[in-house]
């Protein structure tokens, strides 16, 4: 089971950026992340992974192995 005191993987800034992109920033600010539908949270994770992969590819100079 995950430790609730463990620091999150994504920065708050990144989560806020992605929430704005997905159109759920108002919901998050007024009601918290618990009010965001699971589908939108999944999309947020997908966007975060895509960004990380893109950044890694740019940093290493590779195009990825896909």
Image (cartoon, rainbow, N blue to C red):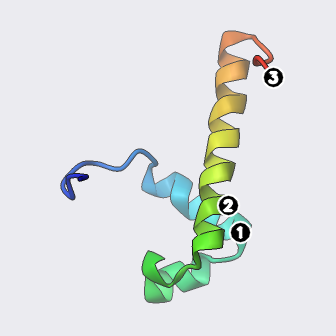
The quarter of the displayed image where residue 56 is located: top right
Q: Which of marks 3 and 2 is in front?
A: 3
**First of labels 2, 1 by sequence position:** 1
Whether tag 2 and tag 1 are in contact, CB under 8 A, the answer is yes
Rounded to the nearest angstrom, the CA distance separating label 1 from label 3 is: 26 Å
Indicate the position of residue 61 as horizontal and vertical percent values: 74, 10
**First of labels 1, 3 by sequence position:** 1
Determine the secondary structure under disc 3.
Answer: loop
| Residue designated by label 2 | 43
Rounded to the nearest angstrom, the CA distance separating label 3 from label 2 is: 20 Å
Q: Is residue 59 left or right of residue 30?
A: right
| Residue designated by label 1 | 22
Indicate the position of residue 7 as horizontal and vertical percent values: 28, 48
| Residue designated by label 3 | 66
Q: In this view, does 45 lie to the left or right of 8?
A: right
Residue 9 numbered mark, or none: none
Residue drawn at the location 59% of the way across and 79% of the way down: 37
Category of crowding for the residue at label 3, using alpha-carbon neighbours closer than 10 angstroms: few (below 14), some (14–19), many (at least 20): few
Whether tag 3 and tag 2 are in contact, CB under 8 A, the answer is no
Determine the secondary structure under disc 2.
Answer: helix
Category of crowding for the residue at label 2, using alpha-carbon neighbours closer than 10 angstroms: few (below 14), some (14–19), many (at least 20): some
The quarter of the displayed image where residue 50 is located: top right
Indicate the position of residue 34 as horizontal and vertical percent values: 44, 80
Q: Is residue 31 above or below residue 12?
A: below
Whether tag 1 and tag 3 are in contact, CB under 8 A, the answer is no
């Amino acid at each position: 089971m995950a430790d609730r005191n463990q620091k999150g993987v994504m920065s708050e800034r990144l989560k806020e950026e992605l929430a704005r992109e997905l159109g759920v920033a108002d919901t998050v600010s007024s009601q918290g992340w618990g009010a965001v539908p699971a589908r939108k949270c999944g999309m947020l994770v997908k966007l975060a992974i895509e960004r990380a992969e893109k950044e890694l590819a740019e940093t290493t100079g590779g195009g990825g192995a896909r």
